Amino acid sequence: MAKANKKAKNASYSYEYTNSKGATIKGEMTAASADVVKAALRKQDAKLKKVKVRKKGSSLFSPRQQPITTKDIAVFSRQLATMMKAGVPMVQAFDIVGQGHSNPSMGKLIMQIKIDVEAGGTLAQALSKHPAYFDELFVSLVDAGEQSGALETLLDKVATYKEKSEALKNKIKKAMTYPITVLIVAVVVSAILLIFVVPTFAEMFAGFGAELPAFTLFVVGLSDTLVDNVWLFIAVIVGVIYGFKQAKIRSKAFRDSLDRLALKLPAVGLLTTNAAIARFSRTLATMFAAGVPLVEAMDSVAGAAGNSVYQKAILQVRDDISSGTTLQASLSQNKALFPNMLIQMVGIGEESGALDEMLDKVAEYYEEAVDDAVDNLTAMLEPMIMSFLAVVIGGLVIAMYLPIFKMGEVV
């Protein structure tokens, strides 16, 4: 009950004030009351004017505002690491980065973090208040850096990790975006032909007085069905897409089955596997270099794997390590998911005391493998997509011209 009451006292407040230099600053803070927010703002600048504080919902930013992306977080990490390495005080670095950020939403988030730090909290504590943008891995690394007195070095590692992760994610998006875009265009073009073009030809063929080819009759029938039920087809497509998204959000079993399928699909399976190994190696290398114990690091590594099959396998590795098994021995028990190269490099790293360096090399190798897999997938899909377009679009055109060719033969 005491914990519940304490939780109920905290609320999210938005604020707006004019500082001593005349600039208007907006942001949000979680506090027990509006007075606490005002006191925290006054503490950073005693000459504040027009301080407005109001209670609001839990969301930090209006949905109309520019969203904060992973790239924004990566850029923030790199900028903060660079400035702190140059000797710029943390609070001043927040001002420079926040006020000069191209994304206003990210600028507000940075200023909120600055206020929390100025109020006496650590950077890790300030970041942990925004789990939507700073995950457990990020916060753990920053906390390790603050405790060891090497925050600048750890921020640099976090920035590198975020940049590599974003690059890997973009490569996978690149592989998926092209075929999906072409398929959508093919469906739209086919629908336009069936709804607007085919009926015009059908009216023209009605006056021929001759029997139409079977293929033409099939396409005309398909066009009539689509025209008569166009809204039903649209509702079904929208319903399927919405249902798929909801099932993915609400059903863990559905997400797990998709992850298992992704590992088994031709070409896509290799891409998914390489990406998961690259994430595993990069995340574990970053956390181990930061001094995070191996068992504790595994929770964050599992969360960053990007695939539930690998997540379960990594959590099993964590349990094995906690019972005294070496990392190499544990990985060796699941060679179906963890390749021999990774296992051997981990073994070398454990023996030489350079596990983070070996894992970094593995991550680089598999990130390049993802690059190659994306290129191979694109090269393989291009002729398949072209063939699909030729069959669908070309088939519709041929169906409409078959009666005309037949008339030419008669004449």
Image (cartoon, rainbow, N blue to C red):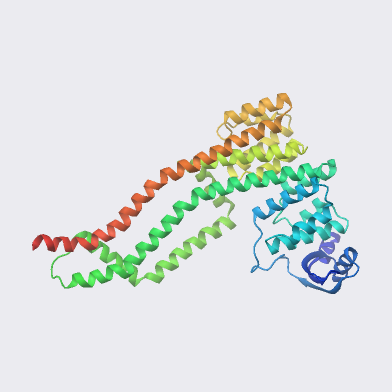
126 versus 300 height, above or below: below
Q: Viewer-proximal residue, 261 or 370?
A: 370
Q: Position of residue 190 (x, y in %)?
A: 35, 62
Question: Residue 52's quadrant in the figure?
Answer: bottom right
Point 46% across, 41% down: residue: 376
Would residue 200 appear left or right of 345 to someone viewing this image?
left
Q: Is residue 308 visible?
A: yes
266 versus 29 height, above or below: above
Q: Position of residue 87 (x, y in %)?
A: 83, 47
Would residue 182 appear left or right of 372 to someone viewing this image?
left
Question: Residue 395's quadrant in the figure?
Answer: bottom left
Question: Residue pushed farthest left?
Answer: 411
Q: Position of residue 317 (x, y in %)?
A: 67, 35
Look at the image and tell me in which quarter the N terminus lies: bottom right
Look at the image and tell me in which quarter the C terminus lies: bottom left
Total marks placed: 0
Point 48% across, 42% down: residue: 375
Q: Position of residue 373 (x, y in %)?
A: 50, 40
Question: Residue 362's quadrant in the figure?
Answer: top right
Q: Is residue 256 visible?
A: no
300 versus 134 height, above or below: above
